[in-house]
Image (cartoon, rainbow, N blue to C red):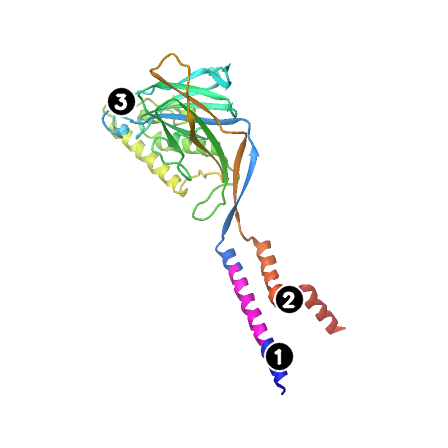
Amino acid sequence: MEPKKICKKILLALVLVSCLAGCIWIVFEQVRKYIEKVTFVATSYTEDLKHTLDLVFCTAEGFKDGPSLEGYKVSRDEYMQRAMPNNVELLPKYFSGPFEYTPINLDNIKILNITTRYNGLCRVFQMKNEMSPKSYYIFRMPKYEKYLLTITAPNEYIFQMEQQWPNTIRDTIEINSDSVIEFEKHTYNILSKSESPCNNNENMTNFIHCFRDELWQHFQKYRCLSHMFQDLVLPLHQSKSRICLDGEEDEMEHQYKIYASLAMKFSKGNFSGSRCMIPCTLDFYKPYISRSKQTEKTDLDLNEIYVSSAGSMSERTKEMYLYDATAIVASVGGGIGIFLGFSCYGWLSKVIAFFQ
């Protein structure tokens, strides 16, 4: 055989082996990513002019005699004596521009006082369709008191007690001076997985309602209700229980352990044994101190905090599988076609021609 033909065959064999190796490699990688359910995230931005959320102000020091208190073991009166006072107030106006203040109706804003294990007394301002970009709500607090601000979706404050948040922790900032605080809204649409399931047909409002109702199902067997859960169980059930008194610490402790266990399970994505399931779409608010605020206030013993949305655009992040069934067929087929020249049309044409 001529050396030229031998070299040609060797070259063709090397090309074939290289193409086979390339095909095997790319098909293996694509199938691996499909089997392992590799994901990616896509980010988009949408206009969001009104926000319904909770502003949660907690005392930074928590308690007079330590950083935490086993409040579930003491009566409400003792808890209130040992907790640092919460003196945050919302002014009946918001700042909308230089020398422009617009009155607001405080009756439209629900204010709650809740008790927590680590942050003492927290005051929750429930803003329903209230927070607009660059419309600053004004809060006042004593100058020498430090506070922690957490911004959550409506009614998520119920997880503030043990700081066991579903899915992920919430951002908190410390306030100890006149400040302008702005926040950004981030919406995450996550995939339901075996290790972290979620419900595409659920929302956070229903999830929290379910959580409260499940707590009540556990609590109603006790003779009384711990003061720490007075605002957590559904209002429908509040009239059915009296608040625990001195001498009923065991009842309060058992209830708290039930709450802590359930909240911790949910924070780890474990919903076994529960009929509640976290939604796949979650809203998070990230507050930050925009700048120090110079005000013309007359009372120098008070700090003024201006709070508003940072802008009209909200970030939306959607988690998706890199390969679904359609994508893996197209990707594998494309790899085989590139490296081996395979196409369904070409091979079917040859089969038809063979039988003609």
Residue that mark 3 sits on: 245
Can you give x and y, in whole percent of width and height, for residue 225 in the image?
32, 26
Amino acid type at image mark 1: Lys
> What is the quadrant of the C terminus in the image?
bottom right
Please, is residue 139 above or below residue 13 in the view?
A: above
Can you give x and y, in whole percent of width and height, for residue 102 in the image?
51, 15
Residue that mark 1 sits on: 8
* Front residue of 305 and 164: 305
Which quarter of the figure has residue 156?
top left
Can you give x and y, in whole percent of width and height, for residue 70 in the image?
26, 30
Q: How packed is label 1: few (under 14 Cα within 10 Å), some, or many (20 or more)? A: few
- Circle 3: element type: loop
Please give the label number shown on residue 342. Answer: 2
> What is the quadrant of the N terminus in the image?
bottom right
State which tag comes first along the sequence, 3 or 1: 1
- Magenta region: 13-29
